[in-house]
Amino acid sequence: MTEINENDPKEVKQMKTLDEEFTRANKHINACGFDEKTLIQRDKDLKELQKMYPTLPISWLEMTWNFCKYTPEEKQNEIIEKDLWKKPLVERQKGGILKNVVIEPKPE
């Protein structure tokens, strides 16, 4: 049996596997910067949440899990007790009278 000389251009080199070629597609998306232990816990919790709430999209469950992970428990309790989840984050203007408005002509 002969050995393959990798420096010889005539030699046939072994191709990379799909896993090696497309590593990004196989890696877990970790936009929040969780460590490996937290990712394992997150995956386990998300599977439980999917069983509990099968009609909700997985993105909503992920968003909820991330919120609970990053928000202190005191803040979560305050949101629940004061019904802050029912109110908008920013009070939007719903009408009124415009004063001191200048309508500029269209540039030509």
Image (cartoon, rainbow, N blue to C red):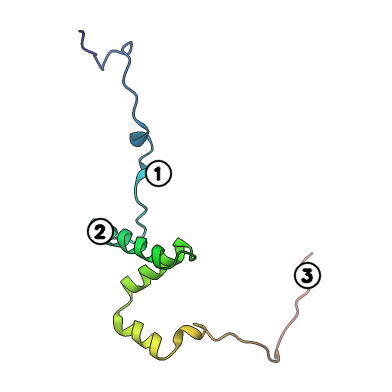
Q: Earlier in the sequence, mark 3 or mark 2?
A: 2
Q: Indicate which label's residue lies in the foreground, 3 or 2.
A: 2
Callout 1: SS? helix
* Residue under label 1: 25
Q: Is residue 104 above or below residue 80?
A: above
Q: Position of residue 59 (x, y in %)?
A: 45, 62
Q: Quadrant of residue 108?
A: bottom right
Q: Quadrant of residue 13?
A: top left
Q: Label 3 neighbourhood size at 10 Å, few (<14), some (14-19), many (20+)?
A: few
Q: Is residue 2 left or right of residue 95?
A: left
**Residue at image coords 44%, 67%:** 53
* Residue under label 3: 106
Q: Earlier in the sequence, mark 2 or mark 1?
A: 1
Question: Which of 1/93 is in front?
Answer: 1
Q: Indicate which label's residue lies in the foreground, 1 or 3.
A: 1
Q: The residue under label 1 is which amino acid type?
A: Ala
Cα distance, mark 2 to mark 1? 19 Å
Callout 2: SS? loop
Q: Is residue 107 above or below residue 37?
A: below
Q: Position of residue 62 (x, y in %)?
A: 40, 64
* Residue under label 2: 35
Q: Is residue 106 left or right of residue 93?
A: right
Question: Which of 16/54 is in front?
Answer: 54
Question: Which of 52/87 is in front?
Answer: 52
Q: Are marks 1 and 3 in contact (CB under 8 Å)?
A: no
Q: Position of residue 31 (x, y in %)?
A: 37, 58
Q: The residue under label 2 is which amino acid type?
A: Asp
Q: Position of residue 69 (x, y in %)?
A: 31, 71
Cα distance, mark 3 to mark 2? 55 Å
